[in-house]
Amino acid sequence: MASMRELSEFFLQQTLANKQARDYEMGAARFERDALPTPAQTANFGGAMAPGAAFADMMGRYPVTPDRDAVITEAFSEEYGPSFAQNLDEGNFMDAFLQGLGGMGDALYAAGPVGAAVGTALKVPRAASKASKVAPLNRQRLAEEYPAVGIPVQNVDKKSGKEFLSKGLSAEELALQAERQAINKEIKKGNYDPYFNIDERYYADPSKYEISGNTLTDTLPKRAETIAAKIEKFDTPEGRAALNAAFDAGNNPKAQNWYAMGQLEDEFIRVLGEEEGRKQFKLRFADAMAATTGGADPGSNLLMAAYGNFQRSKSLPPGSASYEMPHPIGGRYVTGNMAMYDKILNKEVGLTAKDQPKRFNFSANFLGDMNRATIDEQMTQGLTGGKFNAPPSLSYGVIESIVHDEAKKRGIKAANLQDVSWAGFKGSEGKPMIEWVNEMISRTSQVTGKTQKEVLEGFVKGNMPMYGAGGAALTLGALQSERKKESMGET
């Protein structure tokens, strides 16, 4: 006989499933399905049913669905889609599952007529999934709301064997995903009109903001001997050498002045007025980015910040699980980041130098204060030879002081050494934050049909969905890692 606890858990699960199903049905009812696939797209779907095509799909050797403007002769001219292994690695579990079904279908073709019939049936879901990704977008609706959230997918963590719910994409999310992928290809080629001239970027005016607190001192132990021990452990010749080597390797125009966001600050002022504009630039950009920066690349970081702002504008919570959040919101630590957004902005706790030093400095840098260094995962790993992902307790100021010392030797400010070194540690050319904003504006404009100016003003006001880059799925392993890091104060 089931215990009361087991019964309670069962009814809770049923309630969640029913809610997700209702949400899905409501979203599907709103979603337009008027346009049929083009001849080229239909040929691509049909080809997926051919013997051997599913094996090719699993190997990453089947072309993705062509755009709607492709002619019939271009049905198989696109680049290859992700393989079964790639989909698993990227958290696209439903795609991987359907690829696996299709592979079983191909294997059954060798079992005679009955096997062929069963095999064909197993291949239909994958073809149908590909077809759903070219369903038409209701651009006006996507300018007002994020896409309807799909029903969560039950999965099993391959390491622990534990079951967990992962994100399942609705038809609308699949269509948006396909649209974003097509837009991303063009943006990566530079085929878009940037709203801001990144070569003319400049800093926000830090004198207009109250930035109180000092991470160099507020994060240190109280006892002098404990400070000395921390310095001996973390301030090493090897760490300083690595920092300078990273700066030299990353020192190029696209890595320099990464935090220069004065152009965006000016737009906040233009739209909202000077006093309210500066207030909201701090809240909706600097603090929102800082709250959602844990373990995130700049594109995912910007997406989460914009999503938090949108939910806040509607007095809605940010969500407590990744599968509750719409595509393309995601990332390694999405739930922890959105919880931090809720704490810092919605509950108005605010950022402090002592309690959230990395986030505090990150926000201050965006506000134009270059006399602070953001010590994140990349910087910590570089300065400690990969031994730590974040400064351990009571050591942030010790590690940050290394950056200040080396910056002073070069005659530059700490943040101007940190941003370039970050690119050097990562082996990246660099990409200033204002360029990430440009891409988000262009991508959202193309998805929604709104002008870039309308999109920018929607971002400033926090009342329009944004469709930037980023947004990976969250697995149980990543969730467990996230919780461990949060308990250690690392994110």
Image (cartoon, rainbow, N blue to C red):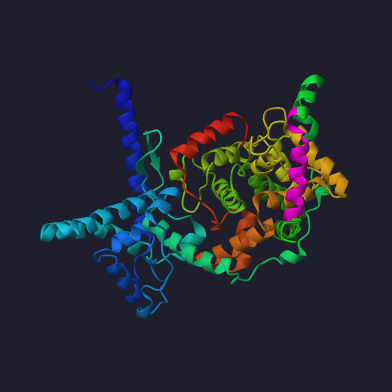
* Quadrant assignment for the N terminus: top left
Relative to 405, say whether 88 is above or below.
below
Place of residue 255 in the rendered image (x, y in percent of width and height, measured from the top left): 72, 57
Tell me: 306 left or right of 159. right
Tell me: 478 left or right of 390. left
Place of residue 392 in the rendered image (x, y in percent of width and height, measured from the top left): 67, 30
Based on the displayed image, in which of its 4 quarters is residue 152 positioned? top left
98 or 214: which is nearer to us? 98
Residue drawn at (79%, 45%) of the image: 209
Tell me: 426 left or right of 316. right
Does the rendering let one see residue 211? no
Q: Is residue 373 magenta?
A: no
320 or 276: which is nearer to us? 320
Place of residue 394 in the rendered image (x, y in percent of width and height, measured from the top left): 72, 27
Which region of the structure is painted magenta? 233-250
Based on the displayed image, in which of its 4 quarters is residue 119 positioned? bottom left
Place of residue 296 in the rendered image (x, y in percent of width and height, measured from the top left): 59, 46
348 or 172: which is nearer to us? 172
Residue drawn at (71%, 36%) of the image: 357
- For the stretch drawn in magenta, the main secondary structure is helix
Relative to 354, say whether 94 is above or below.
below
* Quadrant assignment for the C terminus: top right
